[in-house]
Amino acid sequence: MPTDAKPVKPDLFETPTAIREVYQGVLVVSPKGPSLSESDASALLAEVVAQVPSARGRLLLDMTKVEYMTSSGISMLVQLREACVCEGGTLALCGLAAPIADVLKTTRVDRLFTVTRDRAKALRKLAA
C-alpha cells in the first residue's frame, strides 16, 4: 500500500487520486476526477497495478466522478486490463461519462472491458 494511503474504514483507502476498497474480493477503485490527465493516470496506474494480484485480477473502476480523460487515461485502462488478465481476471468499468464512453466506443477500446452503467451490476459480474 502506498505510504500516502489513509485508511478511512476497513478495506477502504484514500489516496490523492482515488478511493480504493475491496468488495467481495473485487478491488474497486474510484478516481476522484473530474479529469484524468497524464500525471493523474500515471499515478493511478502505479497505485492500482500493485494491488491487482491480491484481487486475483478482478478490478472495477468506478468512473462516476471523471468527466474528462486524456489519451493517457485510455492507455492506463489498457495497461490495467493487461495486469488483470495476467492474474486471470478482468477489468470492469462503470459510471462512464458520455464523452468518455463515446471515445472508447469509437476507438473500439470498449470491447476490452466489461462496461456497465452502475456499480452493482459490474460487481455482480466480477464477483461471480
Image: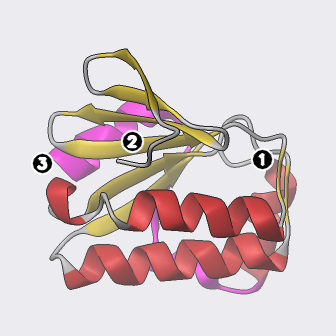
Q: Which mark is residue 28?
A: 2
Report helix, strand or loop for mark 2: strand
The disc at residue 97 is 1
Which residue appears at 66% of the width and 44% of the height? 17
Residue closer to the observer: 14 or 22: 14
The three-letter amino acid code for the residue at tag 1 is: Ala
Q: CA distance from mark 2 to mark 3?
A: 15 Å
Per the rendering, the mark at residue 65 is none
Q: Position of residue 100 (x, y in %)?
A: 79, 60
Q: Quadrant of residue 104?
A: bottom right
User: Badge 1 local density, few (<14 within 10 Å), some, or many (20+)?
Assistant: some
Q: Looking at numbered disc 2 in the image, what kind of residue is underneath it?
A: Val
Q: Residue at x 47, y 36 (%)?
A: 5
What are the residue bounds of the magenta stretch?
107-128
Q: Is residue 108 left or right of residue 125?
A: right
Picture colour scheme: secondary structure
The CA span between labels 1 and 2 is 18 Å
Sequence-wise first label, 1 or 2: 2
Q: Are marks 1 and 3 in contact (CB under 8 Å)?
A: no
Q: Is residue 124 above or below residue 71?
A: above
Q: Amino acid at mark 3?
A: Ala
The answer to whether residue 85 is above or below residue 30 is below
- Alpha-carbon neighbours of circle 3 within 10 Å: few (<14), some, or many (≥20)? few
Membership of 70 in magenta stretch: no
Q: Which mark is residue 128?
A: 3
